[in-house]
């Protein structure tokens, strides 16, 4: 089964699915700044474009270019900024 998700007035859209490896979403983030909350550990892969991320307990933004990833612990929140449309894969572990 594939689920459709929309956040932040449709500025972030994703398709959710589950495999034997676990749950994942793949989507697109429009330019802007967004705050996400986590229930599970998340591994966020930037597929195309670029994000800046402010991770939990961090004071400085980091740049994540296409081909790179970052991790966010369960039960926390993080911020991302996108200057261009950015495609991502988020794996919930």
Image: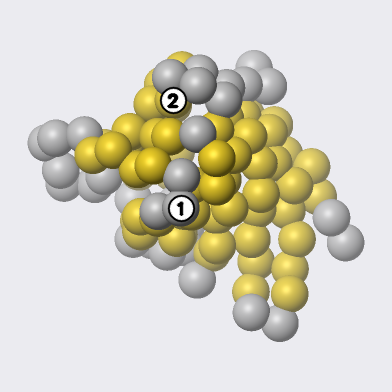
Does residue 28 appear left or right of residue 83 in this picture? Answer: right
The mark that comes first in sequence, 2 or 1, is 1
Q: Position of residue 60 (x, y in %)?
A: 14, 35
Q: Residue furthest right?
A: 1
User: What is the quadrant of residue 34 in the picture?
Assistant: top left
Q: Across the whole image, how many numbered discs are drawn on residues?
A: 2
Q: Under tag 2, what secondary structure?
A: strand
Q: Position of residue 10 (x, y in %)?
A: 68, 22
Does residue 63 appear left or right of residue 81 in this picture? Answer: left
Q: Residue at x 33, y 33 (%)?
A: 52
Residue 35 in view here:
no
Does residue 55 appear left or right of residue 37 in this picture? Answer: left
Residue toward you, 86 or 1: 86
Residue receiving disc 1: 67
Does residue 42 appear left or right of residue 47 in this picture? Answer: left
Residue toward you, 6 or 82: 82
The vertical placement of 38 against 36, above or below, is: below
User: What is the quadrant of residue 58 in the picture?
Assistant: top left
Residue 69 in view here:
yes
**Dot 1, crowdedness within 10 Å: few (<14), some or many (≥20)?**
few
Residue toward you, 40 or 70: 70
Distance of mark 2 from mark 1, alpha carbons? 15 Å
Q: Position of residue 56 (x, y in %)?
A: 24, 47
The vertical placement of 33 against 2, above or below, is: above
Q: Position of residue 79 (x, y in %)?
A: 35, 34
Q: Residue at x 43, y 19 (%)?
A: 83
Residue toward you, 16 or 89: 89
Q: Residue at x 65, y 66 (%)?
A: 23
Depth check, mark 2 against mark 1: the one in front is: 1
Residue receiving disc 2: 82
């Amino acid at each position: 089964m594939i689920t459709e998700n929309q956040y932040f007035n449709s500025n972030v859209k994703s398709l959710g699915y589950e495999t034997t490896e676990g749950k994942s979403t793949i989507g697109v983030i429009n330019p802007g700044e967004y705050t996400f909350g986590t229930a599970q550990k998340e591994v966020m892969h930037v597929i195309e474009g670029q994000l800046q991320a402010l991770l939990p307990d961090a004071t400085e933004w980091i740049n994540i270019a296409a081909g790179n990833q970052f991790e966010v612990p369960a039960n926390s929140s993080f911020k991302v900024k996108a200057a261009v449309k950015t495609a991502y894969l988020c794996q919930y572990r």
